[in-house]
Image: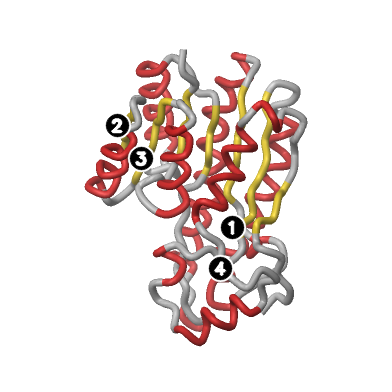
Amino acid sequence: MRKVALITGASRGIGKTTAIEFAKLGYNIAMTYFVNEDLANNVKDEIDKLGVDCLVMQCDIANEQQVKDMVTKTLKTFGSIDVLVNNASIAIDTLFCDKSVENFQKILDVNLVGTFVVSKNVGEYMVSNKSGKIINIASTNGINTYYPMCFDYDASKAGIISLTHNLAMQFSPYVNVNAVAPGFIATESEIKDMNEEFIEMEVDKIFLKRAGKEIDVANLITFLASDKANFINNAVIRIDGGTYGSF
């Protein structure tokens, strides 16, 4: 029986690449999207060619009933969830004077509350099954690379790190819960609105002198899901090429 990886926000970026890498390893894939069904189905088409099954579901991860329905459908389709990757997130980068309570709440609802809701519903199944891996996608923004334009996003990612530690305790000893904290990753969503000067400035901070790639993060995620990482738990792992400075 194939293992099953559930990845939220997998229609593009790190989520898409992670879903494809799990499929290459022989996992059946359950993936969610929120807005763009066409992009999600394009990912499914790529995964179908790899000879595994792929279930695509629209889901607002901040809506508990939608999450319950999504988890139920995944279990009904595949019979198990072996790995959960909490990847779905949003950012609204604006000047401090333009930040609104509504937008701040939206960031927290999706990034932090959504991670909690999905983890709670999947984690309870994993505990009952006495097996599972949960990988949360945090960010170095939640540690020490703060940006005034996205301090609401930064706060949500810091919350995910705290949540990771608590979930690792809550779901012990059966479920490994870890967080991955990417730095500057050259995804479409990361760089589409950035000017060349800013990109060069960010790359200059990185010891390896290049932006990270989606595959770099996906490789770490699939490692944490593997048996080789069975004794890694309650960890927050930076993946930033070695970076200095917080601005």
Which-is-in-front pick, marks 4 and 3? 4
Amino acid found under the numbered disc labelled 4: Ala
Q: Residues within 10 Å of mark 1 (few under 14, many from 20)?
A: many
Q: Give the distance between the C-alpha atoms of the residues marked 1 and 3, in whole angstroms.
A: 20 Å
The residue wearing badge 4 is: 211
> Separation of disc 3 and disc 2 at Cα?
21 Å
165 lies left or right of 138: right
**Residue 156, which numbered label?**
1
Residue density around tag 3, few if under 14, some if 14–19, many if 20 or more, within 10 Å: many
Please state which amino acid type lies under the numbered disc 1. Ser
- Location of residue 123 with respect to 85 vertically, above or below: above
**In what element is the residue under mark 1?**
helix
| Frontmost residue, 50 versus 37 | 50
Helix, strand or loop status at disc 4: loop
Residue 147, position as x, y percentages in the image: 60, 75
Quadrant containing the C terminus in the rendered view: bottom right
Q: Is residue 63 above or below residue 171?
A: below
Which label number is shown at residue 59? 3
Pointer 2: what residue?
Answer: 48
